[in-house]
Image (cartoon, rainbow, N blue to C red):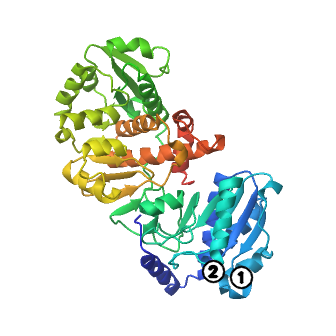
Amino acid sequence: MSFITAEAMRSLEASAFRRGVAAESLMDRAGEGIARRLLAEFPKPGLAVGYIGKGNNGGDALAALRHLRAAGWSIVLRGAYPEIDWGVLPRRKLRELGIAPSDQRPDPAGHPGPCLLLDGLLGIGASGPLRPPLAALAAEMAELRNTRGAVVAAMDLPSGMDADRGDGDAVTADLTFTVGAPKAGLATAAGISRAGRLFLVPLDELPLPGEGPLQLFSPEAFPGLLAPRPHDFHKGQAGRLGLLAGSPGMGGAAVLAATAALHAGAGLVTLHVERDFLPSLAAAVPPEIMVRASDDPVADAFDAGHQALVIGPGTGHASVAWQQRLLERLAGAPTPALIDADALNLLAAAGRLDLLRPHHVATPHPGEFRRLAPDLADLDRLPAATAFVARHPCTLLLKGARTLVAAAGESTRFNPTGHAGMASGGQGDVLAGVGGALLAAGLRPLDAASLAAWLCGRAAELALAEGPFTPAGATLRHLGAAVRDWQECRR
C-alpha cells in the first residue's frame, strides 16, 4: 500500500462520495477504527482529552471519544474555536457525544490509568505554522506530554505537519492513526520525528492505493504472509537454520539471535562456533539450540544442509581464519543468508560487496551502512536504499527510526512498528534471528526481511506494558504475541 499525497487522498474521498458514500459514514468508521486500536494499546481505562479544531479531523477525534467513553474512559474536550465556527459534521459528532468543551486545562492526576490526548486540531488541508488559538492548545498538549506522562495520539497526522513533505511546526505525537491510506509526509525524516508509532486505519469504502515507490508494510496490504501451519506439520518443514554468530566476549549476540529464531518458528537451530569459544556458551544457550564447535565452523555451517544461514552477530572477535573462510564460502554458496553486523563490516573492510547476491539479506544500521556505501550515507534514506540495491543485487534492510526494506525492481517497504525505547544493544541480534527463521521457512528475502522488522517492532510495542524502555530480552518475550497480531490484523 503506497504512501500518497494529500491531493491523491482527496481524490480517493471524492470518488467514494460520487459512489454514494456519505462523509459522515467515513468519519464514523475512522473514529471506530482509531478507538479500536487505542483500546488495544491501552486496555486499562483512563482519561481521554480531545483537542478539537473546527474541521473534520476534530470530528474523527470526537467519534473516537464516543467509543472510548463506552469502554469506561473519562472524557474531556478542549475546543480551539467556538462551536458556531465548527463544520457541520464535527458539530453533529459533538451533539452525539453530549458534552461541552471545557475552558480548563485537564488534570491527569485526578484520574487513574493513562492519559490520552487526541490531537484533532488540524487535518491534511492545513499548511503553515500553528497560529492562535491552535498554538496554545498544541503547547498545552506538549506540556502535559513532557511533564505529566500524557500520550499524544494524532488523528491522521500530527497537527501542523505538511501532509506531503512532513515539515512544519507540528505537534509531536506518540501515536499517529493515518486514516484510509498513509500520507507521504509521514515517511519523511521530519514526519518520522513527529509522528511516533504509525498505525493504519483502513476504510472499506476507500480502496487501498496500489504499488508506488514506497509502501507501508502492514497485514492488510500483505495478507497470507504468515498463514497457519497445516495440522500435520513437523519440525523438518519449519526450516533448518544455521548461525555463524558469537566470538570471545560477544556471546550474548549469538544467544539472542539463536533464541529469537526459536521464537520465530524455526524448526531446528544450530549455532556453529570456533572450538575455543564453546566454553563461553555452555551455560547461556537454551537447550533447544544445538551448538556445533569445530576448527572450521564456517565450512561446517555452509555444508550442513541448512535452509538458511544467519551470519555476523557478535563475530567481531572471530579469528582471521574464520573471516577469510567466510569470504571464500560466500562467493559461490546458494544458501539464503542474512548478513548482519560484523559480517557486513568485514565485507566493507575487505572491499567485497561484490559477494552480495539476490538470496542475501543485508541488515546494516546507519553506521554500518556508511561503511558499506559512504557515498550514499548522507542521502535521504529512500534514494540511498534504492541506489544501494541497484548497485548490489541483494535485499537491504536499512535500520533506523523507521526501517526500510529494499530490493531491485521492487517497491521499497516502510516498517511502521517499533519505538524509541528499543534503542539498546541486542535488538539487531533478535532481528537477525527472526529474519533467518523466516528465510529458513521459505519466505523470499524481501518478505522475510520486511516481516522480521514488523514482528520485532510490534513485539517491542507490546513490551511497553512493562515500561518505556525495551531491552532485547523483552522483545524476545513478546515475539509470539506479535506473530498473532500479524495473523489477526490486530495492529
- Residue carrying label 1: 92
Q: Secondary structure at mark 1?
A: helix
Is residue 28 visible to the viewer in this orientation of the structure? Answer: no
* Drawn side of residue 158 relative to residue 260, left or right: right
Alpha carbon separation for disc pair 2 and 1: 9 Å
Using the image, tell me which numbered label, if any, was put on residue 375.
Answer: none
> How dense is the environment of label 1, judged by Cα within 10 Å: few (below 14), some, or many (20 and up)?
some
Quarter of the image containing the C terminus?
bottom right
* Drawn side of residue 33 relative to residue 98, left or right: left
- Indicate the quadrant where residue 463 lies: top right
Quarter of the image containing the N terminus?
bottom left
Closer-to-camera residue (143/26): 143
Q: Secondary structure at mark 2?
A: helix
Residue 25, horizontal then vertical, whole percent: 62, 78
- Residue carrying label 2: 24
| Amino acid type, label 2 | Glu
Give the label, 2 or 1, closer to the camera: 1
Residue 364, horizontal then vertical, whole percent: 34, 42
| Amino acid type, label 1 | Arg
Closer-to-camera residue (53/244): 53
- Indicate the quadrant where residue 165 lies: bottom left
Are the two marked residues, 2 and 1, in contact with CB atoms closer than 8 angstroms? yes
Residue 484, horizontal then vertical, whole percent: 55, 45
- Residue at 57 percent across and 71 percent down: it is 159
361 up-or-down from 215: above or below: above
